[in-house]
Amino acid sequence: MIARAILIGWLRLEANARGSGRKRFLILLAFCLFLRPGEAAAQVGVVASVFTDDRFQGISVSDGRPVAVLDLSYDAPSGLYGSASGSLVATQDDGPKALGLVLNAGYARQLRPGLTADVGVLHSHYSHYSGLAGGHDYTEVYAGISGRLLGARLSVSPNYLGTALGTVRGEVNGHVSLTPKLSLEGQLGLLAPVGRGAYGPGPRVQADARIGVAQRLGRFALHAALTAATNRAAIYSGRKHSRTAFVIGISARL
């Protein structure tokens, strides 16, 4: 598949730039082998996107700069699913550079028509171009339930974006189709620290919210979203980022 070759090539570039890339290359190679063709009714998706910022739980993981993203997704009839997402960031001085790699795998089961439960694990790695302080890795396990309009998820992470701080996060999200091609999406999350982190005692619960619209135009889609979060400045290496951001982008199914 062409998409596999693109993403493997991206990770090879990252491996040449950073010593730990070899491990991530092996992980991704195993993932690509998992995305093997031939399983009856399996669905494989490939989407390329460009956004003005990359926001994760209300914070910028692209240092407030534009990004290009390639997403691969796989859904098997058995309920197993997986995805891989590679991104490039438009740096200020060095041009486009590898930003992040996100791997996700899980299992979903339909409880009844219109109601699905799932469990999974997600791992993200961001390069030093992200502007994040300390480590740049994030891993979480999660369980969620989703209906036609609303969904909820509970996730646990042992090390939130390299802060040596465990977290528990709960979120509620919604999706409403305003027209056959226009949808409204929203998300509200609460992140509760567990224990003492690397940036001092007494951390508080952090909140984030997102509301956006998506307009489909054939195989393309236009996106616009407003995100907000309480202050998490300690995550960055001396940089200050706005707690709110308006993000726009365009994506295409390949």
Image (cartoon, helix red, strand yellow):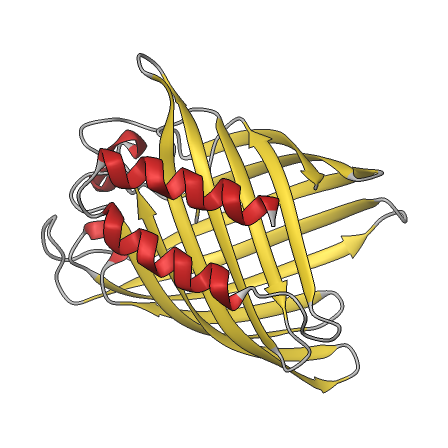
Residue farthest top in this picture: 93
Total numbered circles: 0
Residue 233, quarter of the rendered image = top left
Indicate the position of residue 93 as horizontal and vertical percent values: 31, 12
Q: Is residue 173 visible?
A: yes
Question: Does residue 57 sit above or below 54 in this rendering?
Answer: below
Relative side of 91 to 227, left or right: left
Question: Does residue 113 sit above or below 246 in this rendering?
Answer: below
| Residue drawn at (29%, 43%) of the image | 232
Indicate the position of residue 81 as horizontal and vertical percent values: 57, 70
Question: Does residue 238 sit above or below 54 in this rendering?
Answer: above
| Residue drawn at (50%, 73%) of the image | 106
Q: Is residue 61 visible?
A: no
Relative side of 221 to 202, left or right: right
Q: Nearer the viewer, residue 231 or 221?
A: 221
Q: Which quadrant does the C terminus fall into?
A: top right
Q: Nearer the viewer, residue 42 or 235?
A: 42
| Residue drawn at (17%, 43%) of the image | 19
Residue farthest right in this picture: 180
Indicate the position of residue 53 as horizontal and vertical percent values: 48, 30
Residue farthest bottom in this picture: 111
| Residue drawn at (48%, 44%) of the image | 7
Indicate the position of residue 140 as horizontal and vertical percent values: 35, 66
Q: Nearer the viewer, residue 9 or 249?
A: 9
